[in-house]
Amino acid sequence: MIRGFFRLIGLILMVLAFLSLVYDGARTIADQTLRLTRLGELWNDINQASQQAAQRAVEGVSPFLWNSIVKTVLNQPAWAVLGILGILLLLLFRPGKPLIGYSRH
């Protein structure tokens, strides 16, 4: 049950990554320059208050963590980060290989 839930989340992340890639592609074609939406911009557009709350929470634990790791991830293209997270979830929670020659009694 939990495996299926995380696989569903992985698939949703993959869909969001694809939509973000298509959006960036359409903007690139329209502007005739390379346009990439960073994950931080996307998060800010969706809900700015939650991004600020997350920043305060992470900086409360370690300011170094926010400035080095989280900012680096937030400055990456949204489609890349969402796609990588989706692929990781799909790979980590894939169904096990069936046992051949053994009964499950």
Image (cartoon, rainbow, N blue to C red):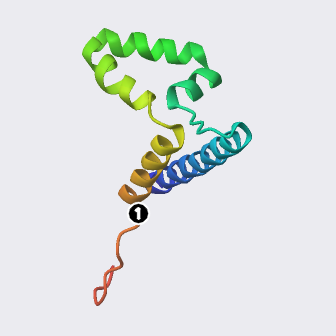
**Mark 1 neighbour density, 10 Å: few (under 14) some (14–19) many (20 or more):** few
Residue drawn 33% across and 79% down? 104
Q: Which residue is mark 1?
A: 94
Task: Indicate the position of residue 68 as horizontal and vertical percent values.
Answer: 29, 22
Residue 105 vertical position relative to residue 24 in the rendered view, above or below: below
Q: Secondary structure at mark 1?
A: loop
Task: Report if residue 62 is visible in the image.
Answer: no
Q: Which residue extends farthest front? A: 32
Check the picture and name the quadrant holding the C terminus.
Answer: bottom left
Instruction: Kindly identify the amino acid type of the residue bearing the numbered disc 1.
Output: Arg
Residue 16 sits in which quadrant?
Answer: top right
Task: Indicate the position of residue 59 as horizontal and vertical percent values.
Answer: 33, 11
Task: Report if residue 99 is visible in the image.
Answer: yes
Residue 66 vertical position relative to residue 98 in the rendered view, above or below: above
Residue drawn 58% across and 21% down? 44
Specify whether 62 is left or right of 34.
Answer: left
Residue drawn 45% across and 41% down? 81
Task: Indicate the position of residue 46 as horizontal and vertical percent values.
Answer: 64, 25
Residue 16 vertical position relative to residue 41 in the rendered view, above or below: below
The residue lying toward the viewer, choosing from 104 and 36, is 36
The tally of labels here is 1
Residue 14 vertical position relative to residue 78 in the rendered view, above or below: below
Q: Which residue extends farthest right? A: 30
The residue lying toward the viewer, choosing from 100 and 42, is 42
Specify whether 16 is left or right of 100.
Answer: right
Residue drawn 31% across and 81% down? 99
Task: Indicate the position of residue 58 as horizontal and vertical percent values.
Answer: 35, 16
